[in-house]
Image (cartoon, rainbow, N blue to C red):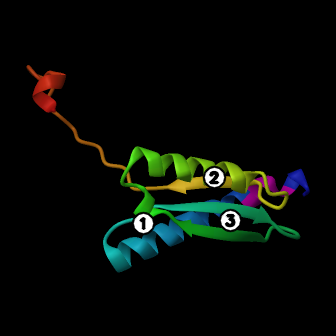
């Protein structure tokens, strides 16, 4: 792969991620957890493999399975990038008199 095309390739990958996340939000109201693997093709084309993992996010044991799946995927010759995409939430708390115990 020509490294001069790397920024363009990354831009295409990020646009693909954004489009898929928006599609899930519009359809389901949430971003479904997925493992995505990217395989650069000729020029700046990218082949994308998507593995839904939402059903595996419910226990630490299953999360280990996801980690192993990602590890196996990245070892394939044609795959150069593997990402786990999930929703993230942030709670903003008042700083006054707030302790960790009160927050939990």
93 lies left or right of 9:
left
Q: Residues within 10 Å of mark 3 (few under 14, many from 20)?
A: some
Q: Mark 1 against mark 2, which lies toward the viewer?
A: 2
Extent of the magenta region: 5-9
Residue plotted at (68% across, 69% down): 48
Dot 3: element? helix
Q: Earlier in the sequence, mark 3 or mark 1?
A: 3
Q: Give percent across and percent down for residue 84.
A: 54, 54
User: Mark 2 — residue?
Assistant: 70
User: Mark 1 — residue?
Assistant: 32
The extreme right residue here reads: 2
18 lies left or right of 78:
left
Residue nearer the viewer, 29 or 63: 63
- Determine whether label 1 and label 2 are within 8 Å by CB: no
Label at residue 12:
3
Q: Give percent across and percent down for residue 70.
A: 63, 52
Dot 1: element? loop
């Amino acid at each position: 792969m020509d490294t001069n095309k790397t920024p363009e390739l990354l831009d295409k990958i990020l646009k693909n991620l954004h489009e898929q996340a928006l599609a899930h939000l519009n359809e389901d109201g949430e971003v479904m957890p997925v493992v995505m693997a990217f395989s650069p093709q000729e020029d700046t084309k990218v082949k994308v493999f998507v593995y839904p993992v939402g059903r595996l996010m419910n226990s630490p044991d299953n999360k280990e399975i996801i980690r192993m799946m990602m590890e196996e995927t990245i070892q394939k010759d044609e795959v150069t990038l593997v990402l786990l995409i999930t929703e993230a939430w942030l709670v903003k708390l008042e700083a006054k008199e707030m302790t960790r115990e009160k927050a939990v």
